Image (cartoon, rainbow, N blue to C red):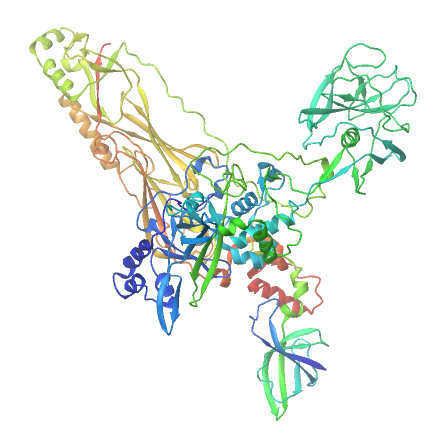
Amino acid sequence: MAVSDPTQSTYFYDLLDAVQRTYGLGDQWQKIAQHTATPEEMYNILKQTNGVSIVTNKNNEVVSWTVDTTVFNKSSSAITDIGNTANSNLVPATSSSTSLTTVKVPAYSAIEEGEFTEIRSGATKYYQDASGVEQSTNANVVAGQVMGAVAGAASLAQLGFTVTEKLYEKYPDFFETNNLQIFSPQAWNEIASSGTKFGDVINVLFFGDDETTEAANKNKNSIYLEDKALAYMALYAASKGIYDPDKNYTLDSGTIESSGVTANVTVSPRINYGVAKNAMSATFSVGGSDYNALTYKVTFADGGFGDIYYWSWYDYSTTAVSQSVMTTREAYIYRKYSRQDDSHYNLVAQSSAGSKKPLNNIYRPSLGGYSILPYQPETAFTPLIGAARTDDELQIKSTITFSDGTVYKNNNELAVAALLANNFTKTVGGVEGIDKQVDATQANVSSATDVDSMLSVLKNTYPELWQNRIESKVVQPDGSNKTFTYLPVPMPTGGSGAQPTTEGATQNNSTLDPESDDATDKQIATSVQPFIGEAVAGIISSITPTITTNPDPTGEGDTPAIIIPTGTANALWSIYNPTLAQVQSLGGFLWSSNFIDQLLKMFTSPMEAVISLHKIFATPSINGAGEIKVGYLSTGVTDVNLVNKQYITVECGSVDLPEYFGNVLDYKPFTNISLYLPFIGIVTLNTADVLRSTISVTYQIDVLTGACLAQVNVKRDASGGVLYQYTGSCAVEYPLSAGTYLGAVSNVLAGVVSGGVRGGSLFGEAGLIGGALIGGVTGAMNGGVDYPRSGNFSGNAGAMAIKKPYLIISRPQAEIADTFPRIDGYPTNYSTTVGACSGYIEVEGVHVENINATEDELIEIETLLKSGVLV
Amino acid sequence: MDIKLYVNNSETNQIGKSLTNEIVYTGSLRGEASVIKPTMLVEAENISNYNYAYIPEFNRYYFIKEIVSVRTGLWRLSLRVDVLESFKESIKNLAVIIKNTEVIATNNYMGSHVWQTNVKNTTTIVNFPDGLLDDGEFILITAGG
């Protein structure tokens, strides 16, 4: 989720280094080093310095200057274990997430009396000393960007809320960029920068090493979020209702309309408990028929859990149908009956089709006898519904009126029964999955109507945030300076970048140690949000529903398990793993007169007893040591490792392969990916197959023959398997006779002549150039065709080559115009209305209708929309 | 009829233009007039600084295509309707499929001419952490067990 290296300190010298690499030690470098550049000069110098980037918000204000140290020091991707990410599409590209440092760029020049004075650094950390006096120090911070969702969750954590996975079960797009952005586009543009396909990013600072003050160290691992971003997220979340105080309404009396009959209901006080969401269905069989027993999980006032069971039963004698709500702790049967004598009641289960069957083991009052599960006490009951039903199957289409006047209409019989049975308290407000932290302070945001007013509210509520702020003065293109204020917020560590959860991140714990595993388990607030079917739908009506017409963009499935055969016919041959010295000793014995005399009694040639001597480039599986025996003759060469398995596996490890550009340029025909495999050669991989994945290479080697099989496992979206397999030979044969030598040489020559037919695909697929894949592609002048990078690497040739696999990634150099979003726009294929857009749009399709204009005007409207308009 | 003149600094394809320096004149149509391309005569000292107009009676906004000084104090304006401004509220309600966008629903993974590259490339090598042995192991296979 976070995309920076917090261990790096700010180094002005990194900036100087970058300037030097670009300009040398000339005038530009000296002006930066000696702080004699005017703001305009500095801006122009840095803007063209290789490796130095400016980060702007969407209003094109410069937010920070960064130095990409990986330009000079190749470092590994900040992304790890991509393969196990549930949705690889959410892994950010490395070119926008390389290790960055916020540079202490000279932020402003103080002009006094017509002359430039000291140019100071940009970032200042404020804190309070032991006496409560505000102090300041240079801030060693690292610039970074996080997805909007992460900033949102971090904000909520600081504001005294927890975010759990439950939020995304119902509202998967709660923090989706469009939802955040559309909320207040103008304010959004002040805090966000354009990100990748997956939305805008929020600029943050990560605290690096700072040993100057204890206070600074306390917040060592906090992230610092711009104050306006915090206020924005607070305003956004408030609009969704998370700040609404719990409102509890008690149903102590109500009106139920059932089949047109109105009856007053009085519910005797019962244990107050809320009803948790998600009914669980259970089926049971009675007399061979299956019935559904709907249950709800409930929490009792003393914190215990139980289930509510709902039955409706039919009275054969009176034809009265009643409802029952029973819990696993206490059973209260509320019945509708037409006579006082309940001795003839039989409890039955009612199927959805209406057929009724008696249940076994049902407690029947006044008859004593067997208990039921759940247990029903012998207590007096209060009539639930006074009116008799009119048909065999009770169907309640009920309205329930709460004491606050709210009316729920509910078709759910169970809901009705549960509400009535449990002296239901309705809680409104809030968003499921966002709960209040215990012992946290939530601000009173009722007066906040915009970002500025929310900012005021937060300042008054959380003054300690501003006491520990970081201010960054950043020079702008016009030479002015803009001050950005960043506040410490806890970094969420759970979930994903698009759906983060605030595990371990709380208002009182902004010191988050990323290396610690003290993050608590998912914590759910003690207040349980009631959820009964449609009743809650109206509470969250303001959240924009997501309409998904495209399939889930993640893969699934794994290839079958690899099972290596076992067992060897070790009665027919013996396999040894001798050292060089042992081989030489064996050779001496083989050609001794004593051995030859003995062996000639069994073999025509002594070499018939030695089947093979070769080298493999893997460690065989050894089980003990022994003496080399040739044709059952002892050779006297002892303590030789005995190989006990014919097949061995060599793991070459794995690498992550994230996108680099985060756009089309990562894929063919622009980017090509090849893989060098020892003893096989260089093979071409399909870029679309392997990007956004974790690639691992495994060799299966036949010790007996030297045959090797390289398996390329591609894991993506937490699934995948062996997508590529290549064969080769990793055995180097040693000549034991003239015949064996000639055979080895001919094999080598055959491999050379064939030019690489063995060992996998050495001539990769031709790339697609021009309009076949991507319409109007230009500039892909070298990326379309794969050129063979190697020939056959089997056996003897492979022994002289590199023994570790490596990827060769050939990428283009982008020449994307900075202003293209405004002039040409990003590509898209999105359905919306013109009014919901902002900025430049070109329309693909539109029906110009409901406009009172002439035909020519209508045609012109369509033409203009399709040629591009500004909204 | 009245004609309101403005200075328009927005792009011609902007929906919702920024109009300033409003001034109202009374003008007369010159002969038969098209609602889409009217020509009006306006008495005024100097209106050469204006480039945009609104005619309430036609309920339309116009680009000023040409300003001709007929004589001192009399100007002839050739206008062309600006459909985007005249019908902007209705246009905003139109359901569309957008194919290029600056802000909303941007997609970095669809083809477009904006993804430009030069003829050069960069090569990145990513090594796997492990591999086969640099030095091999002898394997001797002899007849007999």
Specify the farthest residue to the bottom.
B72
Q: Is residue A265 left or right of residue A698?
A: right
* Position of residue A456 measured from the top left corner of the image (x, y, whole percent): 59, 55
Q: Is residue A93 left or right of residue A344?
A: left
Question: Which one is in front, A681 or A58?
Answer: A58
> Does the rendering let one see residue A196?
no
Q: How many numbered callouts?
A: 0
Going 58% across and 84% down the picture, which residue do you hit?
A: B48
Q: From the viewer's perspective, is residue A379 above or below residue A28?
A: above
Task: Tell me which corner region of the image, top left, top right, bottom left or bottom right, holds residue A23.
Answer: bottom left
- Rendered position, A94 above or below A527: below
* Residue A351 relative to residue A434: left or right: right
Q: Nearer the viewer, residue A624 or B98?
A: A624
Q: Position of residue A814 (x, y in %)?
A: 39, 55
In this rendered view, identify the residue nearer to me: A324 or A651: A324
Q: Quadrant of residue A248?
A: top right
Placement of B65 over or under B136, stated as above or below: below
Q: Nearer the viewer, residue B140 or A66?
A: A66
Question: Can residue A593 be seen in this snapshot?
Answer: yes
